[in-house]
Image (cartoon, rainbow, N blue to C red):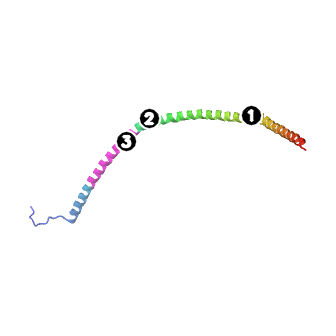
């Protein structure tokens, strides 16, 4: 047995080997902790991906139905737009016909009434002017 003041006979190589062994033991413990945490992370990630895929599939189906319904509505809106275009074209034609039927005769009637008023006014002025000396 060694007494209290005696030095053990460890050589420099043995001390270096002891230090390296302790370093490797600490490194292995650290790596074990990291691997355990990584395993938990991967487990949680796979669980989240599984839940997400369970939720995404119905959402994608709903989006597909919505897109199909939107396309159907767009076809209906396109038909309505075509009908409005036809109606506006017909209104332009009707307006042209109405203008031709009413505006031309109204202008002529207006001109005729103006001419008659002017003729009557001249006649009246002449009649008044002829009585005066």
Quickly name the residue at label 3. 48
Query: Is residue 77 found left or right of 99 in the rendered image?
Result: left
Q: Farthest residue in the front direction?
A: 133
Q: Which residue is labeled 2 in the image?
A: 58
Magenta span contains residue 29: yes
Mark 3 is surrounded, within 10 Å at the Cα level, by few (under 14), some (14 to 19) or many (20 or more) other residues, namely: few
Give 127 or 108, whichever is nearer the viewer. 127
Locate the N terminus by quadrant.
bottom left
Q: CA distance from mark 2 to mark 1?
A: 59 Å
Of marks 3 and 1, the one in the foreground: 1
**Residue pictured at 52% horizontal, 36% vertical:** 67
Q: Quadrant of residue 128?
A: top right
Q: Which residues lie in the magenta part?
A: 27-52
Q: Residue under circle 1?
A: 98
Q: CA distance from mark 3 to mark 1?
A: 72 Å
Dots 2, 1 in contact, CB < 8 A: no
Q: From the image, state whether disc 2 or disc 1 is nearer to you.
A: 1
Name the element at disc 1: helix
- Observer-nearest residue: 16 or 110? 110
Position of the C terminus, as image quadrant, is: top right
Query: Dominant secondary structure of the magenta stretch?
Result: helix
Image x and y of residue 69, in percent? 53, 33
* Residue at image location 50% in from the left, 35% down from the top: 66
Q: Position of residue 53 (x, y in %)?
A: 41, 38
**Would residue 67 be found to the left or right of residue 37 on screen?**
right
Horizontal side, residue 64 vs residue 41: left or right: right
């Amino acid at each position: 047995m060694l007494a209290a003041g005696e030095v053990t006979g460890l050589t420099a190589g043995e001390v270096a080997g002891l230090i390296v062994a302790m370093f490797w033991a600490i490194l292995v413990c650290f790596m074990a902790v990291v691997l355990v945490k990584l395993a938990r992370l991967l487990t949680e990630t796979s669980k989240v991906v599984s839940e997400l895929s369970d939720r995404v599939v119905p959402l994608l189906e709903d989006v597909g139905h919505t897109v199909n319904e939107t396309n159907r509505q767009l076809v209906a809106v396109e038909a309505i737009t075509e009908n409005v275009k036809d109606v506006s074209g017909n209104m332009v034609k009707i307006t042209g016909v109405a203008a031709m039927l009413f505006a031309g005769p109204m202008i002529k009637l207006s001109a005729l009434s103006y001419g008659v008023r002017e003729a009557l006014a001249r006649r009246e002025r002449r009649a008044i002017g002829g009585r005066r000396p």
